Amino acid sequence: MKQMKNKCGFLSPALLKMFCFLLAIAPFISINATVKYTINEGWRFSRDHKESYHLPDWNDSKWETINIPHTWNNKDAADDQPGYYRGIGWYRKAVFIDSSSSDRITSLYFDGANQTTTLYVNGKLVGTHKGGYARFSFDISKYIIPGTYNLFAIKVDNSHDVAVPPLTADFTFFGGIYRNLYLVVKEKTSFSISDYASDGIYIRTPSVSDQKAQVETETLLDNYLDAKRKVLFIQTVLGPDGKEIFVHQQQLVLQPGSFKISHKNKFTIDQPFLWSPEAPHLYTLKTVIIDAQSKKELDMQFNTFGLRWFSFDSQNGFSLNGKQIKLIGTNRHQCFLEKGNALPDEFHIADIRLLKEMGGNMLRIAHYPQDPLILAMCDKLGIITSVEVPIVNEITESQEFLQNSLQMTEEMVKQSFNHPSVVIWAYMNEVMLRPPFLDDSTRHKQYCREVNRQANEIESLLRKLDADRYTMIPLHGSLKSYEDAGLVNLPRLVGWNLYQGWYGGVFADFDTFLSKYHAKYPTMPILITEYGADVDDRLHSFKPERFDFTVEYGDLYHEHYLKTILQNKYISGGTIWNLNDFYSESRTDAIPHVNTKGITTRARGLKNTYLLYKVLLAKTPLAYIGSKSWKYRAGTDDGNGSSKQPIKIYSNLETVDIFHNGAFFKRVSIPDQHLQLDLPFTAGKNSIELRADSKTYDFAEFEFTLHPGNLQNSDFSELNVLLGSNRYFEDRDARIVWVPEQPYTPGSWGYIGGSPVRPKTKSGKLPATSVNILNTENDPIFQTQRQGLQSFKLDVKEGQYAVYLYWADLANSSDEKLVYNLDNNTIDKDRTKSIMNVQINSVPVFSNFNSQHGMNAATAIVKKIQVNVVGRKGITVDLQPVEGNTVLNAIRVVKLN
Ligand code: GCB
């Protein structure tokens, strides 16, 4: 361990001793001069608007009572109705303000509210803030009556506003006061909170080496008094071990009524403890101001900072403190299952722990600044970050839009300035995703020029505010459009959001794209800011395909990308899209309204891909069984009383012993840290255990339904089949599994005739439709279909059965064109209207059955039909077309008696 040296910039050690002595004999009154606490509870809320809602005597007793963090969209952004409420919501509360506020400065401080917030106190307008992702505060001193209750009325509006970014994006713009709300009471002389809601103290580390670090601080002070004030300004630096290593004291004279008075300070730390992912040492800067006369403490602030240096290099990637490290981590969206974006503190903290436990060393905080706890946790745990101005997909060509973007830039930098984890400021994510006016080249060029102008303004502001960090624009895989807008060489770093093998193409296109770009721009460093594939972890396939949303396709995608990122030195690293599944209202994928590219679910359940990274990045021995959450499984007897089930194993151990149902099955070596092997599952419970060096590394149990190969000779209980599909779907609530279709063979079961519905897109045919199916949570059961089907047959034994026929009219949907879907939007539907007659065992059941069923959107329809089977006739469902093609989405057959 290095010895930390005391270093004092302004005081000699003798003076320092004397100073401490003086402080000891004349102690200042050390109460917390600044009082800051949440006022989250018991707000009245109404999701509508009336001009008079801000008036103190408005009767809000019938309004809902809520607690902050709060959003009004956690339910409607996930329901079957397209769209979600984007408009005004009002919050009201009578807040008691202590009489001590009368000669102090009182503010209302928001950690974040989406997106335009207007505050009224006691009926009077205080101010408005625009933007949904930064902190902001209002000085309410003039509006309050201390010693009594004061009525706060807050109007929040999340309507689309052409002047406020983001305009569009692949995430839900949840409205409301969704982060903590504080009352802050400060002395009339204090650190300023009016500099873009930062805490008024900025710490720069312009030069750091393992020998020496230079630290510069700037403190902004406010003096509201109409008289001069003399203050003692004391700044102390504590080392990571809590020991004092530097003290600076100075008397300052603050002029009356002056604000953001800047006081700068510099010091050097010899042989510093460096900040890194392995050892995230943090220093603490304690700043105090004391009234020179009364010795009363006026304000005190603790800020942590870290000492490190870093660079991105176009050939060698990223290095920190002189050592090359590959950045591997994730992006994060700030929402959670059923909560929308309104998360309590613990949830933010838990996410960063989750990333650290995976072994990740980077978080791209996309696409907007997040709760202050996120950066605080990244500092503590050693996770390198990039933070982003929330301009996504497009801009508005207006000065007002630019001004708002610049304001957001300044808020972001000033609020996050001191965090050692931040190495990149980013802006304009995929701003040329769907550039307008493509059919009018003059107008298009004008748009490109405006994008360039706005980007230049943001870039220069960033460089002016912070000369030490990198700037970055994250681009999507269409290099030409960013060249047209002149964005490729503008920032210090280019981020690539790449999805080859998902939205189109094959995995290898990822490698080709990068090597071509690298050859064309050999001096530009590269960071893969996004890559990912959607996975609904209830879906599985033994024949994984692009866009099937299965766990297995997601595995293949990440295995390929991760290998490429690790193997190529010039790639600085990659941040997976995304840490968590997140709400994106307009999506209609396997889980409608959700982007499922997370390596964890919305409730942070671990997907296979999380385990893959964890094992690959781990420094300790690990072994995991993949798809443990796929508990209910089924398969057909292959003649040996069992069915082969592919099981994924992740491990960094040289060999792992696999035990199946308690018995040794096989010793395997796992050269690539992941391996798939077939295990013969038998009916009922199947257990798997992974052992090495007499230690159990992982254990899992599965419930297996073994379907008889020949239905006539064996017992049958139930069968659930997805038509037109290769996928398995696990219905966890019902604890059943749906299996892929198969053609009929005598003695068994299957379809006769027809073909699977495979929507056509510019990038080829897709294995399933992306249609939001109304009135079900199990959309994948209905999202595939066989059309032109003549019959479905099961050669079951005599008895009574229930046959359930599942339909959703996939032709009856607009298949919304989604901007982020790139070339993967449906261009030609091979789905037609269908009216048919249905017979079971030659008995007419439905005539002129219309799968639309009088609904004007694809809706889940399930018909349960009781069927008696006599002799060896089995069950035959016949479908005859009346108009269009016959269709059937799924079939479930259960033996009753
Ligand atoms: C992107 C966007 C991100 C989307 C993602 C996707 O490139 O930057 O906002 O969510 O693709 O999943 O399509």
Image (cartoon, grey):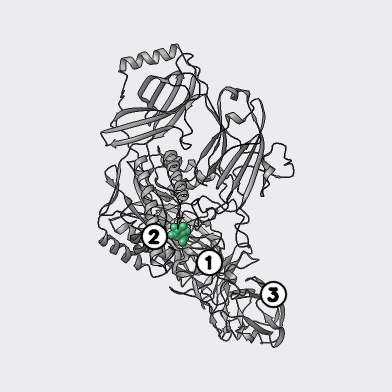
Callout 2, which amino acid?
Gln
Are the two marked residues, 2 and 1, in contact with CB atoms closer than 8 angstroms? no
Q: Residue furthest top?
A: 25
Residue annotated with mark 3: 854
Q: Is residue 42 magenta?
A: no
Callout 3, which amino acid?
Gly
Task: Report if residue 609 is visible in the image.
Answer: no
Q: With 246 as the anchor, is 643 left or right in this view?
A: right
Quarter holding the N terminus is: top left
Q: Main secondary structure of the magenta part?
A: loop
Q: Residue furthest front?
A: 442
Q: Nearer the viewer, mark 3 or mark 1?
A: 3
Span shown in magenta: 5-10
Label 2 Cα neighbours within 10 Å, binned few <14 / some 14-19 / many ≥20: some
Q: Nearer the viewer, mark 2 or mark 3?
A: 2
Residue 816 placed where, x, y %?
54, 68
- Residue 446 got which mark? 2
Residue 660 placed where, x, y %?
49, 64
**Disc 3 from disc 1: Cα separation:** 30 Å
Q: With 809 as the anchor, is 541 left or right in this view?
A: left
Callout 1, which amino acid?
Leu
Residue annotated with mark 1: 539
